[in-house]
Every structure is written in C-alpha cells, then in structure tokens.
Image (cartoon, rainbow, N blue to C red):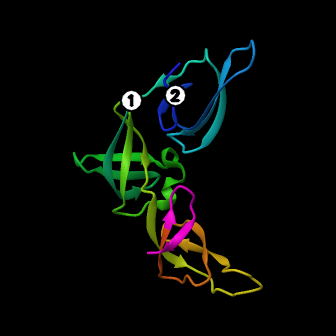
C-alpha cells in the first residue's frame, strides 16, 4: 500500500489522483478498508473510493513548475513554462473547471507526474472583469442580496447587487465564489 496522506498524488487503476480526504478503518475480524476522496488530475472530477489493504496503489513522483497561460487554440490551452520557455498544451478535458478561471497572463503551476505534465494548479484567487451584469434590484432582502454576473472567461458568479459591468472582481478558484472587488 502506498504512503497515502492528504495532498499526496497516487495512481489507481491507471489514473493519477490527488488525495483530498483519507480515512482508515478496521472492523473486527475483517480486513482494513480505506475511504479516499480523490480528485482526478486529468478531468478535475472528484470521486470517492473504498479500497481494501490489498488493492494496488502507487505513489507518483510529483513536481510543480511555474508557467503562464498564453492562449487557447480550439480545444487546446497553451502555457509557457517560466523556466524553459517551452510551450505546454492541455486539452480542455484535461483541465476540468480550471478553464473557468484562465485569462491570458495568469500565473499557474503545472503539475508533472513522472516527468509528464498532467494538470495545472490555479492560484487561490483570480481577478476577472465583469462583462455582463443585470441591474441590481433590491427586493425583500434582509441582507445584501446577490445577482448572477458573467466574467470575461464566461463563468457566471453570484455577486452583490452593487457589482456592475466593467468591475474587476476577485473569485476564489477553490469554491468559485465571489470574494470582493479587486
């Protein structure tokens, strides 16, 4: 069994995952089981697995290198390695929901598993320009109230009523929530 802990990268059934949650349990005479919440490094989807101690899991050597998002070409996203100036491309399906936050010039980390680029790590917060914002109508709200606004990448975010078209807002890339004005 691999040395599993939260944040480690493992290979299970031929795919690379990052461990989000880990629980080890042992019940009476039965074998030990491990409940894992894993994020697929290729698709970004989160899945839960229950494994026995006999299941095959490999540790994956991971390296993170800084890069800058350059441009999109059809279904491919291109990044410039900040150290080697090499062009690294990912298919849209490899990046999952990270594409909702990519704008030219954004600094990211490229995750390499076994010397092969498998995914990217976004900064915790990104600043994006609001391109569509319906007028804020305060109704029967006790507190602030929100409205859906569309940012330059096409993502729709719930923001306060005072946010207008042209504003730059800060968004948490982990949750997709509005944090504040930039």
45 is within the stretch colored magenta: no
181 is within the stretch colored magenta: yes
- Tell me the quarter of the picture where residue 69 sits: bottom left
Give whichever of discs 2 and 1 has the lower sequence position: 2
Task: Identify whether 143 is placed above or below 123.
Answer: below
The location of residue 76, given as percent across then percent down, is: 43, 50
Q: What element carries label 1?
A: loop
Q: What stretch is highlighted in magenta?
A: 171-182
Which residue position holds label 2?
4
Task: Identify whether 28 is placed above or below 147.
Answer: above
How far is mark 2 from mark 1, CA to CA?
13 Å
Task: Name the residue: 49% across, 54% down.
Answer: 98
Task: Name the residue: 43% across, 75% down.
Answer: 182
Which residue position holds label 1?
61
The location of residue 22, given as percent across then percent down, is: 59, 33
Number of numbered tags placed on the structure image? 2
The location of residue 147, given as percent across then percent down, is: 65, 77
- Tell me the quarter of the picture where residue 110 sits: top left
């Amino acid at each position: 069994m691999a040395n599993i802990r939260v944040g480690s990268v493992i290979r299970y059934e031929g795919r690379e995952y990052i461990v989000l949650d880990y629980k080890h349990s042992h019940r009476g005479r039965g074998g030990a089981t491990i409940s894992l919440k894993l994020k697929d490094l290729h698709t970004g989807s989160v899945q839960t697995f229950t494994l026995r101690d006999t299941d095959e899991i490999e540790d994956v050597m991971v390296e993170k290198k800084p890069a800058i998002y350059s441009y999109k070409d059809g279904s491919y996203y291109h990044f410039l390695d900040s150290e080697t100036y090499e062009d690294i491309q990912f298919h849209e399906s490899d990046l999952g929901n990270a594409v909702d936050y990519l704008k030219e010039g954004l600094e990211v980390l490229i995750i390499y598993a076994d010397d092969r680029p498998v995914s990217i790590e976004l900064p915790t917060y990104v600043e994006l320009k609001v391109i569509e914002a319906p007028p804020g109508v305060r109704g029967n709200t006790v507190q602030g109230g929100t409205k859906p606004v569309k940012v330059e990448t096409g993502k729709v975010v719930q923001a306060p009523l005072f946010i207008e078209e042209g504003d730059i807002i800060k968004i948490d890339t982990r949750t997709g929530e509005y944090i504040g004005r930039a």
